[in-house]
Amino acid sequence: APLILWFRRDLRLADHPMLAAAVAAGRPLVPVFILDPETERLGAAAKWRLGLGVAAFAETLAALGSRLILRRGPALAVLEALLDQTGAAGVHWSRAYDPAGQARDTAVKAALKARGVQAVSHPGHLLHEPWTVETGQGGFYRVYTPFWKAVQGRDVMAPPPPPKALRAPGGWPASDRLDDWQMGAAMRRGAAVVAGHVAVGEAAALERLHRFLSGPVQDYATARDLPAVQGTSRLSENLTCGEIGPRTIWHAGMRARHEGKAGAETFLKELVWREFAYHLLHHTPHITHANWKPEWDAFPWRKDNADAERWRRGLTGEPFVDAAMREMYVTGTMHNRGRMIVASYLTKHLLTDWRVGAAWFDDCLTDWDPAANAMGWQWAAGSGPDASPYFRIFNPATQAEKFDPDATYRRRFIAELSRAPGPDALAYFDAVPESWQLNPKAAYPAPLIGLAAGRDRALAAYSARNS
Ligand code: FAD
């Protein structure tokens, strides 16, 4: 009897413990991707990007004599139908760590076992399962540096190599057509612009890794802070769809470190920030939707408001903020320095609830990740674990002088700041919704709030909370 391989955010062949185990079992394999309610709920850009990943992975499987069967509906119902149609003996998948995914998987596993069907979950998405990293007292880590110290010397399993072929079943069950799912429907015109900035699939991800490690890694420790420079790996987009495994990146980074490449250790540490985010998500799942520190529930965050709408549109009049917001529409991602600055500006200068910003990132990022996004926002807002304290307020103007000294980044994305705007600055007007009625010839807006006034207002709210 065949095995069903339920692919989710693990759209690759190499470094895939589940796939390696299934191939070793020697049975025919039925790979399936399910558009289930949890996947339906993804933000516009993340869902569109996942659809591109699914298409690429289907081709990869076809080249190995296999297929990717596409089905839509609640996962358990879909899997039960497939079990009936294929006579499969079991279902295998790579673990999810977000609360919704975990709840779904737990229910599926229990129901399948009750039917007498083998249901096996495998690692793969992370270097270390979140519950295996413990403090001396047996608890979880709330602070990054001790977490890094705990994992840096740990063995990381060598990534299993990609299988050369996948045994096909005697007959294939029916499959939906990916086009019929319209996974890009909510992207409207944005997709045409962002498509020029994505690198889809396992081969593209490996190429990104090798390109980064054969050059930019040398200067990574400083260049990673400069948004005008291509100084980072850009692997977040691929990691979130599982087009590359973290063990592959870890081992390649370790080799680079042994070869004495400056910056390799900093890069490994960033990869471990991703692990830390999942560690927190696992142990404190409320991080996605509630203040991690409950004392922040009393803070007078503003709910969604007109200033936040200007922030979403990249029209705050604060050039570093607007450049970063526009970068997100045009490329589907935002430089880490930009993410920190726009998040600080929204939660401090605009005194707006971090969840308003996090929800917008959910909708706009092609590299959206449930753990990193939640941790990043709570870090910036001051409400999270190991957070930047609320009273440390990024000044976007000073940040710009420091990290974008010749204004290359700001001019690249803000047409109004340049007499002859370049393609990315103009592309923003094609990427955003038509209903915003933006015009590249309009004057650049005046600042929503003075930087000193916004800072003072935030600090006053902070001390009122503490008094
Ligand atoms: P590189 O610098 O090449 O780093 C390599 C990898 O390390 C990244 O691909 C990523 O997986 C991991 N990493 C690096 N920095 C961080 C970090 N601060 N936290 C967690 N992991 C990290 N990252 C996402 O992947 N998805 C998100 O939705 C997301 N939202 C964020 C929201 C805010 C408010 C902030 C401040 C940060 C957010 N980040 C998010 C983290 C970070 O900005 C991105 O991971 C990084 O910019 C991706 O670029 P890169 O792949 O070139 O990273």
Image (cartoon, rainbow, N blue to C red):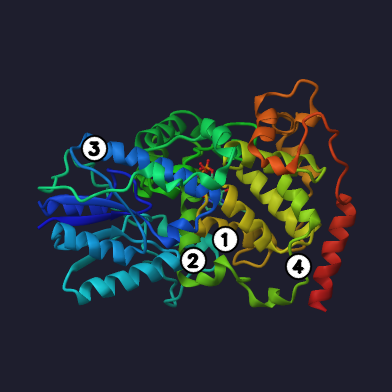
Q: Position of residue 374 (x, y in %)?
A: 57, 60
Q: Is residue 148 above or below residue 249?
A: below
Q: Which mark is residue 440?
A: none
Image side of residue 425 versus residue 277, left or right: right
Q: Which sits in the foreground, 259 or 210?
A: 210
Residue at the disc numbered 3: 62
Residue at the disc numbered 4: 301
Residue at the disc numbered 1: 374
Q: Is residue 439 above or below residue 53?
A: above
Q: Pick whichever of labels 4 and 3 is earlier in the sequence.
A: 3
SS label for mark 2:
helix
* Whether label 2 touches label 1, CB < 8 Å: yes
Q: Nearer the viewer, mark 2 or mark 3?
A: 3
Q: Pick whichever of labels 2 and 1 is earlier in the sequence.
A: 2
Residue at the disc numbered 2: 281
Which residue type does callout 2 highlight? Leu
Q: Nearer the viewer, mark 4 or mark 3?
A: 3
* Whether label 1 touches label 4, CB < 8 Å: no
Q: Which sits in the foreground, 377 or 437?
A: 437
Q: Position of residue 370 (x, y in %)?
A: 51, 58
Q: Is residue 218 above or below residue 336?
A: above
For the residue with label 2, is its CB less than 8 Å from the closest atom of ligand 1?
Answer: no
Name which residue lies at 35% across and 50% down.
10
